[in-house]
Image (cartoon, rainbow, N blue to C red):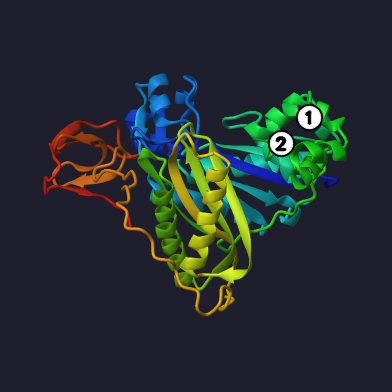
Amino acid sequence: MRAQASVMHLDLDAFYASVEQRDKPSLRGRPVVVGGISGRGVVSTASYEARVFGVRSAMSTREARALCGHAAFLYPRFPAYKKVSEQVFGILRDLSPLVEPLSLDEAFVDLAAADLPDLEVETVTATAARIRAEVAEVTGGLTASVGLASSKFIAKIASDLDKPDGLVVVAPGTELDLLRPMNVKVIPGVGPATTERLRRAGIHTVADLEQVSVEELVRLVGKSHGTNLYKLARAQDDRLVEPERETKSVSVESTYETDLTDRPLMEQILTRQATEVAGRLKKSGLSGRTITIKVRLYDFTTINRSATLPAPTDQAGAIARLARTLLGELFTAGETAGGVRLLGVGVSGLADWIQEDLFGEDAEEEPEPELTLPEPVRRPTWAAGMDVVHAEMGRGWVWGSGRGVVTVRFETAETPAGPVRSYPVDDPDLQPYSET
């Protein structure tokens, strides 16, 4: 830990949903859910109005509709989110050269590298307040919650304590007072499985965890995870704020309308995905050593399995073979018995060189059986929430579509809530709209 609270974590509040409410005046103050809105969809972000009803990220859209059926359910508009993200990160990089993005809507900032007169609590607090005001001004009213602390771990916890639109400073020396009463789930990497193992051992809070030896934690959850838990339970975190300017991984994943249970079919899907990943790697002049498969089960439990090659590759055959091996291990363990709703392949540990003969010169991809692959769930042509423009009515967004009709509300961020009109889906006067 540092001697000053010089690590800032900024998190834009309910980011996707907030952008939608900003750009769609009729949705302001209403519950908004952004994500995959089909029966197989998953919530990406819920507005605070929707969270009151229990809707949360990673929940199935079906469950979200049951909890808050009157919400506006919208597909994501990533170009709009990326534009706002670039505005916010521009503000952060003007403050400090050391900005570490975690996603489009959150980042760490090293204030020790900023041009500040000192790093006293009063100075960093005033700086954070100024940044939050600049974010609101530049983004048209979006709010950000900020945590300031002596480490990345504590700063991230602090930013979540007073959401939305909060600013929490953890003064140096008070980190353990903050942590000890908290549930162990506050520690990164403590998911449902680890929480259950700790619960069975009588460990519920960080204070409980602090009393456990590193040897016992290693026995409970493994060497790497156990050692990390031991350190974080004592607020020991010396990680640097590291700007990330390069791609860390390349991946492809798809959700399917019907749960997958057939192993040959799933292997064929992984092979197809591996081919797409390999194509992206080659196009970027990259290769990777670590192959990961992502499997989301029928009950939304997500399993990731990885293996590392001795040298980096960009070959579809090498990626596919290892992905199929990882899937086979899950089948052997019986972990896919209930059905799989999402399947994906990723490559990380990227490099700009390739071991040409990793599997030998004569390594050929084994012919795959001829199978009819299921089509993944796809966004409809007129997706709810997408931007459109009509020759007579001007700009608006898709309210909904079906049975040959698309319904549009005509409004923008700069107008009052506008009228609603319906058109045939093939109306030549109605077109998708893009600012680029």
Decide: few, some or many residues near mark 2? Use Cα within 10 Å; few <14, some 14-19, many ≥20.
some
Q: Secondary structure at mark 2?
A: loop
> Which residue occupies 47% across, 71% down?
282
Q: Is residue 71 above or below residue 325?
A: above
Q: Position of residue 34 (x, y in %)?
A: 41, 36
Q: Which mark is residue 346?
A: none
> Which tag, 1 or 2, sits closer to the chain's start?
2
Q: How many marks?
A: 2
Q: Secondary structure at mark 1?
A: helix
Q: Quadrant of the C terminus?
A: bottom left
- Circles 1 and 2, Cβ within 8 Å, touching? The answer is yes
Q: Give me the C-alpha separation between circle 1 and circle 2.
A: 8 Å
Q: Is residue 428 above or below residue 16?
A: below
Q: Is residue 78 above or below residue 201?
A: below
Q: Is residue 121 left or right of residue 157?
A: right
Q: Nearer the viewer, residue 230 or 357?
A: 357
Q: Nearer the viewer, residue 126 or 152?
A: 152
Amino acid tagged 2: Ile
Within the image, what quadrant is residue 407 found in?
Answer: top left
> Which residue occupies 56% across, 73% down?
359
Q: Nearer the viewer, residue 163 or 291?
A: 291
Name the residue tied to disc 1: 206
Name the residue tied to disc 2: 187
